[in-house]
Image: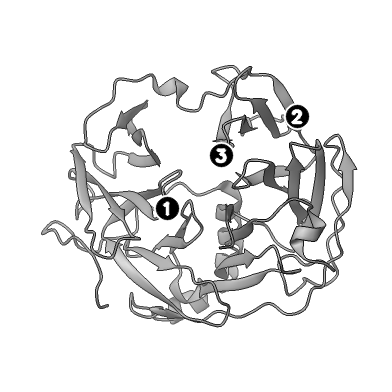
Amino acid sequence: MRNDRIRIDPEFDPRPEEQQGRRTAWLVATAVVVGAALVGLFMAIPSSPEADDDLAVAASPSPTVAAPSTSPSHAVAGTPAPPAARPSALAALSEPLSEAIPGFTDQIVMLTTPAERFSVIRWSPSESSTDVVLSMDRIAEYGCWSVGLDASGEWFARVQRDDTLIVHHVLDTPGESSRSEAIGLNVGSVAWHDTEAGSVAWISCARSGSGPSTLYALDVADPAAEPTSIRTFQQDCKDGIWLERWSDDGALISTTADTDFDQILVDPDGATVNTDIRNWASVPGLDDDAPVVDHAASPDGRFVAAIVDEHWDVEIPKLCVMDAESGGLVTEVSEHDSDIIAMTWSTGGRFLIYELWSFETESGGLEWYDTETNTTTRIPLSEIVDAIRTANPG
């Protein structure tokens, strides 16, 4: 593969699949079911890191999904029944998105990762339906896993079954092809930067998996940039070390040794930051020990949204929107038998966009919470979405 920016180290060599990242429970369950049915096919299909350098994409056809309804005071409508036949578009309306959601002018980028493919999907505000702009066959490369979208939605990353980290530039036009680039070897865990477009960090494991591990970072948007080694850890991938998050504060590293679990925050220069890791996910107005699984501040700094979910409990997951200054509760969302999968703010901070999904009925939708009008609009989705990004359509 030409022009790949892999940092070659004598210790690096493809190794058996051991560290496949921290995947969500639903994805693991899906992979087990599909894998049992298709294991013979997987074993029979060869693959190579070069096989998907040029990735074809296809445009979605005409809209097939009905327009949403708007409900006051953030009361969410009932989950729609699953369609008799899956629509060809992820979402579609009878009018442009900007008309269905008055005041919303952003382009949306979404990621879906069903068992058979990865798909990156764009929805322009002037369009009534979504378009697939990047699609990859997962069956041809059994064992690869998704890193997801960067903060801008312009880059998608995945790790191949030989633990090579691959990034793809997501193009704007359906029907164009996308080039892939290998940037790291023996990769055990990866994280895109929370807010900086194209910035990615990862931990590379020793060849045997039982030696020191190294944290690297790269700005993939800069074609002249090379991977930078930030810090080497004595913990090895077999004992348990992984990258949880990558932000302006640095890299949040988790480690396990025997039964001990620890976390440290490493700044971009490799130094350990003296900070209370327990406050990493603190949200104004919520207890420090609240089981916050994701949180995001609005771009204008007025609000903080948090997904609160006690995975091992029977409590219904909830989404809380808090006033960033006072800590007061602005609104709270919870729906019986529905999980809150992904969320993002509009670029101006007026709208919070999130996904509610029922695994029981295999149905759900995107929700737009309007902070100005205190109303919510739902648009049905034909399949689950892993990640949502917004950007100015330019």
Provide the residue designation for mark 1.
197
Image location of residue 251, percent across then percent down = 34, 37
Viewer-nearest of labels 1 and 3? Answer: 3
Look at the numbered disc 1 and give the secondary structure of its residue: loop
Question: What is the number of callouts on the image?
Answer: 3
Q: Quadrant of the N terminus?
A: bottom left
| Residue 326 in sight here | yes
- In the rendered view, would you say 342 is above or below 46? above
Q: Earlier in the sequence, mark 1 or mark 3?
A: 1
Q: Nearer the viewer, residue 46 or 167?
A: 167
- What residue is shown with label 3? 299
Q: In this rendering, which labeled residue sits more in front, label 2 or label 3? A: 3
Q: Residue at x 45, y 26 (%)?
A: 280
Quadrant into which the C terminus falls? bottom right
**On residue 331, which mark appears?**
2
Residue 334 image point, x, y percent: 77, 35
Residue 160 appears in the picture as rendered: no
Q: Residue at x 66, y 65 (%)?
A: 124
x, y percent for residue 283: 56, 24
Q: Is residue 209 left or right of residue 160?
A: left
Looking at marks 2 and 3 on the same chain, the residue that comes earlier in the sequence is marked by 3
Q: CA distance from mark 1 to mark 2?
A: 29 Å
